[in-house]
Image (tube, grey):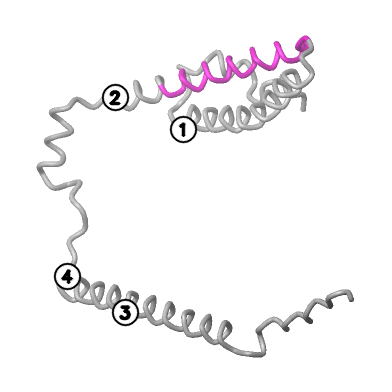
Amino acid sequence: MNSTTPSVPQELLENLESLSVGKVCLIGKELSKDLFRKIPIFLRCFKDNLDKKTYLPPEFEMLLNSCNLILQKIVECRIIIDKKLNRSNEICSDYFIKQFSKGNCSPIKKSNALIGKEQEFDKNRIKLIKLSNALKWIDWQDTVIDPRNLKKPQAPLAVPK
């Protein structure tokens, strides 16, 4: 498949309004996959151009237009889905505050037993870290103090007579 040809037929892209939400979602998914496939090619071509400081090949312009078309169609899919599902694009601040005040978005409530186990886990973790550091310190001292690890003394320099 050529990097500039679309993966979705043009007839489907022109009649997105008449399709069901499920089909529009599938087309949006295919367009996203197609875009993810084309972007590395686009970036590699762009990087090669920067390295060589030459003129861009004509395929680059076609690839750029193709990526732009795909992005426009993805946005169009999103708008169509939002229209058909009667959703708005933005959440107003009052609605957002109302959702948090109701407690729908509150964190999970933990039982006392779970909180106790988490505290015990943290205490044990700190103990293990301290023991590990102490063992590393003892190992380092053993390595440094052991006479077998000392460097051999150099022979005294012979003074020429």
The residue pinned by badge 4 equals: 111
Residue 86, numbered circle: 2
Q: Main secondary structure of the magenta part?
A: helix
**Residue matched to label 3:** 124
> Residue 78 location, x and y as percent?
42, 24
For the residues carrying marks 4 and 1, which lies nearer the camera in this image? Answer: 4
The quarter of the image holding the N terminus is: top right
Q: Secondary structure at mark 3?
A: helix
Marks 4 and 1, the one that precedes in the sequence: 1
Disc nearer the start of the sequence (1/2): 1
Which circle, 2 or 4, is nearer the viewer?
4
Is 43 above or below relative to 58?
below
Q: Secondary structure at mark 1?
A: helix
What segment carries the magenta color? 55-78
Q: Position of residue 135 (x, y in %)?
A: 46, 83
For the point 56% across and 30% down, the residue is: 32
Kindly identify the amino acid type of the residue bearing the numbered disc 3: Asn
Up the image or down, 126 lies above or below 73; here it is below
Residue at 29% from the left image edge and 73% from the top image edge: 122
Q: Say which of marks 3 and 2 sits in front.
A: 3
The three-letter amino acid code for the residue at tag 1 is Gly
Q: Disc 1 versus disc 3: distance between alpha carbons? A: 51 Å
Q: Residue furthest bottom?
A: 147
First along the sequence among labels 1 and 3: 1
Q: With respect to residue 98, does 20 lie above or below? A: above
Q: Is residue 59 magenta?
A: yes
